[in-house]
Amino acid sequence: MKTSLTIYFLFITSFLFAQNLVPNPSFENFIICPNTDDIENAPPWFNPTGPYTSPNLFNSCAPQWPSSNFGVPLNGWGFQEPRTGNGYAGGIIVYDEVSPPEREYISVKLNSPLIALSTYCIRFYVSVCYLHSLPNGYMGSRYAIDRIGAYISDTIIQLNTNYIIPVIPQIQNPTGNILSDTLNWMLISGTYNANGGEQYITIGNFYPESNTNKIQISDSSNLSFGSFYYIDDVYVIDCNDTLGISENDDTNNLINVYPNPASIELTIDITMTNKYFFELYDLFGAKRKAVTLDCGSQTKNINLTDIDNGLYFYSVVDRNGSRIKTGKLLIIK
């Protein structure tokens, strides 16, 4: 019995994480506990603009500042808990102490190339570095900016530069939406229609100063960085995989479940001639939500704040227990 459960667990775990094409998406795997400015310590992530720049890796295995610059949550650049796991990456999105202003990027090769004509859901999370005092001055961010995005490419980017990678990102935080939250993780997301063969994702700021909006979040004259951001939980997922729904449509019912992936709330638009029930299950078959859907037309909002990240299954069942609609739901916070 124990062996069967172990095999089942491994199968389900592999199925769940196979959805994400980004290897080491939350920077949990590393060669040695971080002690230098070296994103390559979290393979297969790499620095596409080395050796002139040095994006960072942070993990709770390292001593916290001031014993180490790479600890979690307190490190040499600021204070932040990981969004998930024990670590995250970080980089200088704009360093305005030099001319031209410096940029840092992080890149990784995907687990498999993108498929032509497929649509991919891409998202990652950022947090602007929180200021704190250090013996040699101040570290952190003088500014919060809006220009952080992701570029998808079929070939590797490797430039010996500390300035802008001259490409247009396909995924971009909206212009004017200043990413200024120092407490919470902020989501950057979008969809990408693949040409086929793309196999790299690069994250950073691809715009010049003239096209980057910013606000000052610190008035310290000693602050040494322009804008430093932490990065965590990078996803590239085939949108069809997250929306793969097996349906048995009842002509008397109209049921629309969205968004998918979902984060903190799920919405159900329904037109029902009878009472039905919405049920949400985890991968081990445990029921996590049960909501009554009354007859008539209505919109039902379901709170997901108590549900962890992962893949779930849902069913809409009638009073006899027959399933009239089933589907998969991916929750990413």
Image (tube, rainbow, N blue to C red):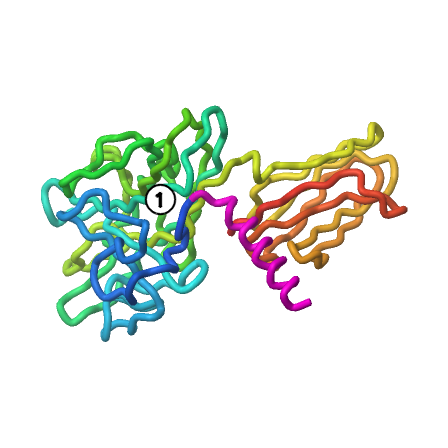
Q: Residues within 10 Å of mark 1 (few under 14, many from 20)?
A: some
Q: Quadrant of residue 132?
A: bottom left
Q: Residue at x 85, y 43 (%)?
A: 322
How many numbered discs?
Answer: 1
Q: From the viewer's perspective, is residue 69 above or below residue 37?
A: below
Q: Position of residue 258 (x, y in %)?
A: 63, 39
Magenta span includes 106: no
Identify which residue, 37 or 102, lies in the foreground.
37
Q: Position of residue 159 (x, y in %)?
A: 17, 38
Q: From the viewer's perspective, is residue 82 above or below residue 249?
A: below
**In-image side of 319 versus 303 (left or right):** right
- SS assignment at label 1: loop
* Dominant secondary-structure state across the stretch colored magenta: helix
Q: Quadrant of residue 294?
A: top right
Identify which residue, 130 or 258, lies in the foreground.
258
Identify which residue, 252 or 208, lies in the foreground.
252
- Which region is colored magenta? 1-21
Q: Residue at x 81, y 44 (%)?
A: 317
**In-image side of 172 versus 288 (left or right):** left
**In-image side of 71 versus 26 (left or right):** left
Residue tagged 1: 178
Outermost residue toward the left? 99
Q: Residue at x 70, y 51 (%)?
A: 280
**In-image side of 310 versus 98 (left or right):** right
Identify which residue, 208 or 154, lies in the foreground.
154
- Amino acid type at mark 1: Ile
Magenta span includes 5: yes
- Tell me the quadrant of the picture where the N terminus can be found: bottom right
Q: Quadrant of residue 218?
A: bottom left
Q: Position of residue 145 (x, y in %)?
A: 30, 44
Q: Position of residue 114 (x, y in %)?
A: 43, 33
